[in-house]
Image (cartoon, grey):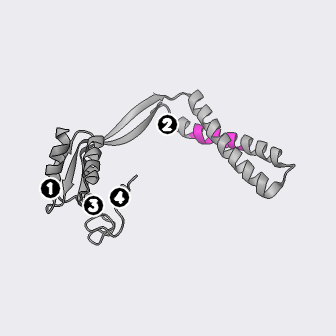
Amino acid sequence: MSQPLPGPGSPNQPGGPAGRGLPTPPKGWPIGSYSTYAEAQRAVDYLSDQEFPVQNVTIVGVDLMQVERITGRLTWGRVLSAGAASGAWLGLFLGLLVGLFVGGGESLPATVIAGVIGGIVFGLISASVPYWASRGTRDFSSTMQLVAGRYDVLCDPQVAEQARDMLARLNIQ
């Protein structure tokens, strides 16, 4: 898998000599516009397969939207069970660490059980306090995504015409 952000040596990129960590707008001529990221990625992959210098290509998400997808209703039962479960895992992990490195062979089961019980208590408290404090203003769980309305593929002007011609062959296939 490729890196989503270029490294500190890339010119005109975040962290590069021109940017030094500051956001910089993308540069280049448009060589394709796609409705999904998968299509834009397929186009760049095709260029790479054709041995085109893809370091001159940028995928730009345009018309960005923050999308929140609701995954379910939150109830006290769900909040407490999720808190207890995550606390139990944390307690198990800490109990094993303490039991293996501090305790010894005979006290390991007691240390692990104490860790799990302590983790469950901690998980219940850490999950219930924020839910109680919200007073019903957010009784649902969700996931967030940043989505673009379209994805433009830009290319360095010196090789943009060659890239456009190559992508025209991809659309024919």
Rounded to the nearest angstrom, the CA distance separating label 4 from label 2 is 36 Å
Q: Amino acid at mark 2?
A: Ser
Mark 1 nearby-residue class (10 Å; few <14, some 14–19, many ≥20):
some
Image quadrant of residue 160? bottom left
* Magenta segment, prevailing SS (helix, strand or loop): helix
Q: Is residue 66 magenta?
A: no
Rounded to the nearest angstrom, the CA distance separating label 4 from label 3 is 12 Å
Q: Amino acid at mark 4?
A: Leu
**From this viewpoint, is residue 65 visible?**
no
Mark 4 nearby-residue class (10 Å; few <14, some 14–19, many ≥20):
few
From the image, tell me which residue sits under label 4: 5
Q: Position of residue 168 (x, y in %)?
A: 15, 45
Mark 3 nearby-residue class (10 Å; few <14, some 14–19, many ≥20):
few
Earlier residue among tags 4 and 1? 4
Q: Nearer the viewer, mark 4 or mark 1?
A: 1
Earlier residue among tags 3 and 2? 3
Q: Nearer the viewer, mark 2 or mark 1?
A: 1
The residue located at (23%, 57%) in the rendering is 52
Q: Amino acid at mark 1?
A: Gln
**From this viewpoint, is residue 57 visible?**
yes
Earlier residue among tags 3 and 1? 3
From the image, tell me which residue sits under label 2: 134
Q: Position of residue 90 (x, y in %)?
A: 65, 46
Earlier residue among tags 2 and 1? 2
Instruction: Determine which of the numbered discs, if any, sits on residue 55 in the image.
Output: 3
Q: Is residue 128 magenta?
A: yes
Q: Position of residue 55 (x, y in %)?
A: 27, 60
- Please give the range of residues in magenta: 118-129
Q: Is residue 39 left or right of residue 3?
A: left
Earlier residue among tags 4 and 3? 4
